Image (tube, rainbow, N blue to C red):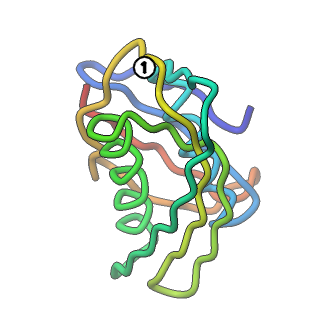
Amino acid sequence: MPYEEVQHTADWCLRVWAADLPSLFVEAARGMNALSGARQTPGLLTRRTFESAAPDPESLLVSFLSELVYAAEQEHLVFDNFKVEVDGQKVKIEMGGTPLASVDKTIKAVTYHNLHIRRTERGLEAEIVFDV
């Protein structure tokens, strides 16, 4: 798994890594779903396109993950299939998902706390803190 939970005093923290920025977005979404214990209900596949513009990759990532938090909380949908295109300060993501059966713990928000996407020997890496 290209993600792991990191101990954090009050919230949840996830370290995620991937070869490139589109893959990092995908692994961050998968890691967030795993961290919350999101379970899907077999059902009609929902497809959606998410587009956003932001001044930096970190803001694009927060915007994307926040969209997934909203979908789970307000629309009871969990997305687990992604095609990501990043072009400078813009991202376009084709998403597929199904109804949400349950979660172990609800994520309230994706934060910017210490968020920095950096290059490491594993590729790109980031630590994302979630408010729970």
Few, some or many residues within 10 Å of mark 1 (<14, 14–19, 20+): few
In the rendered view, would you say 37 is above or below 15?
above
Position of residue 92 in the picture relative to residue 68 (left or right): right
Position of residue 35 in the picture relative to residue 75 (left or right): right
Position of residue 10 in the picture relative to residue 84 (left or right): left
Q: Residue at x 41, y 64 (%)?
A: 58
Return the x and y of residue 54 as percentages of the image width and height: 34, 78
Position of residue 98 in the picture relative to residue 6 (left or right): right
Return the x and y of residue 27 as percentages of the image width and height: 64, 46
In the rendered view, would you say 30 is above or below 4?
below
State the residue lying farthest toward the top.
104
In the rendered view, would you say 81 is above or below 78?
below
The N terminus, quarter of image: top right
Return the x and y of residue 92 as percentages of the image width and height: 54, 75
In terms of depth relative to the viewer, which is nearer, 74 or 59?
74
Return the x and y of residue 94 as percentages of the image width and height: 60, 65
> Which residue in the protein does label 1 denote?
7
Check disc 1 and give the amino acid type. Answer: Gln
Look at the numbered disc 1 and give the secondary structure of its residue.
loop
State the residue lying farthest toward the bottom.
88
In terms of depth relative to the viewer, which is nearer, 82 or 23?
82
Q: Residue at x 51, y 76 (%)?
A: 91
The C terminus, quarter of image: top left
- The number of discs equals 1
In terms of depth relative to the viewer, which is nearer, 5 or 87?
87
Q: Residue at x 34, y 82 (%)?
A: 55
Q: Residue at x 76, y 59 (%)?
A: 19
In the rendered view, would you say 75 is above or below 105?
below
